[in-house]
Image (cartoon, grey):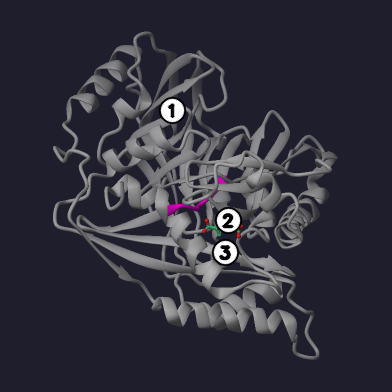
Amino acid sequence: MTSTLGLVLRSLTVPLADAPSLDAALREDSLCWVLRDEGMVGFGALSEFSVRGPERFTQAHHWWATLTADAVIEDRVNLHGTGPIAFGSFTFSKVSEHDSRLIVPRLVLGLREGSAWLTMNSFQDDLSEERAKAELTEQLATPTSEQTHALADFELTTGSLSEAEWMAVVAAGVAAINAPTAGSRAVQKLVLARDIVARSAEPISRAKVLGQLISRYRECWTYGVGNFVGATPEMLVEIQSGVARARVLAGTVDRAGAPEDQDYPRRMLMNSEKQREEHEFAVKSLVRELAPFAADLSVPREPFVLELPNVWHLASDVSAELASSGDHLPGTLALLEALHPTAAVCGTPRLEAGALIRELEHLERGPYAGPVGWLDAHGNGEWGIGLRGAVLETAHTARLYAGCGIVGASDPASELAETWAKFRPMLQALGVQA
Ligand SMILES: C=C(O[C@@H]1C=C(C(=O)O)C=C[C@H]1O)C(=O)O
């Protein structure tokens, strides 16, 4: 943990003409949050807060609130993401041995609505437009890895469980759903995940991996916070000017080998009782947790089919006007704490599903399926669910995670196949697969 007691955060945001594209700006250790070429890339860590345990959101909130309370901010751009921001990643589990963290970069290059900006943060009185631009030029001059994106030489191994063991876990989950034990509330949906490990002969280029994800997964938020990288299609919550938006996903069909038939995804998702049920659980759980914070909540009657390069998902975009108590809107981190984990990554009911995951899954999820994103000093931010990602454990090793919603009608072999479809974005970005 870095103590920032007594330090005054200063932040300057200036418009930037001739900005490089965000993927071209990525260096090996950049922070990243990009959707369709827009978003933010951060350089350097001015200040970082690391935390573990059940109070991780509250403690992170206090750190950020203290740091920004007396901040001296000059924002000449005023867009979503300008001013001082912190990138962050929180573990799925409150008992995880991985750190949750917030990182305030020294520099942020941002692009939104066609406008580019540069933010410089400091604890000294040394901010100026010239200095910020000079530091960006210096950052961009540092080379990224020479590794070209050819199919690299990788060895893939299973992580904590073999495929057969994981299918047995899914079968146990299905059995628990179909024959609930007396005395506890029955689990109706459960999300079970697994991990695989990719070892590369060559050092993995984090910048290239992120670049691949940005260019291939245009409907996904490509994130890079510390050693956690990926491209998630699921928005836990975006908060902008008092409005919260979420994109809830659940229900998946693999596109690999799918028939050409245009109607196939709709038929497989919209007309499938199992998929619709899984989706319903996820939407309901989000709405239930969001409702206490909302003055007005808008929930679509029907989901839509979201097309990604690897899979189709059932998707629902929910939005809410946040209710203020006094003159305060709920803090971003308070909202995250309430919404996480949704039934898209945990299950229904949440407590019982969580207990069953701990009992059955045999996986340290780390940051996988936890919130990942950024927040500003005014309560705005974007927090995706950390899916379709990997932890770059060493220069040569990536641990990939994927999970599936399990209901009473789930089949272990189909769920195993679904995890492979969900590993695909990272496998392709690493160069393990074409
Ligand atoms: C759990 C994951 O994805 C979640 C589970 C889904 C499903 O079971 O259909 C779909 C989207 C996500 O909400 C994952 O990608 O690892």
- For the residue carrying disc 2, how many other residues have a C-alpha within 10 Å: few (<14), some (14-19), or many (20+)? many
- Residue 268, placed above or below residue 46: below
Q: CA distance from mark 2 to mark 1?
A: 24 Å
Q: CA distance from mark 2 to mark 3?
A: 25 Å
Mark 2 highlights which residue? 57
Please state the horizontal and vertical placement of residue 405, each as a whole percent of the image.
62, 64
Q: Earlier in the sequence, mark 2 or mark 1?
A: 1
**Residue type marked 1:** Arg
Segment colored magenta: 384-389
Q: CA distance from mark 1 to mark 3?
A: 44 Å
Closer mark to the observer between disc 1 and disc 3? 3
Please state the horizontal and vertical placement of residue 285, each as a whole percent of the image.
75, 58
**Cβ(mark 3) to ligand 1 < 8 Å?**
yes
Say which of 246 and 313 sits in front: 313
Mark 1 highlights which residue? 10
**Cβ(mark 1) to ligand 1 < 8 Å?**
no
| Secondary structure at numbered mark 2 | helix
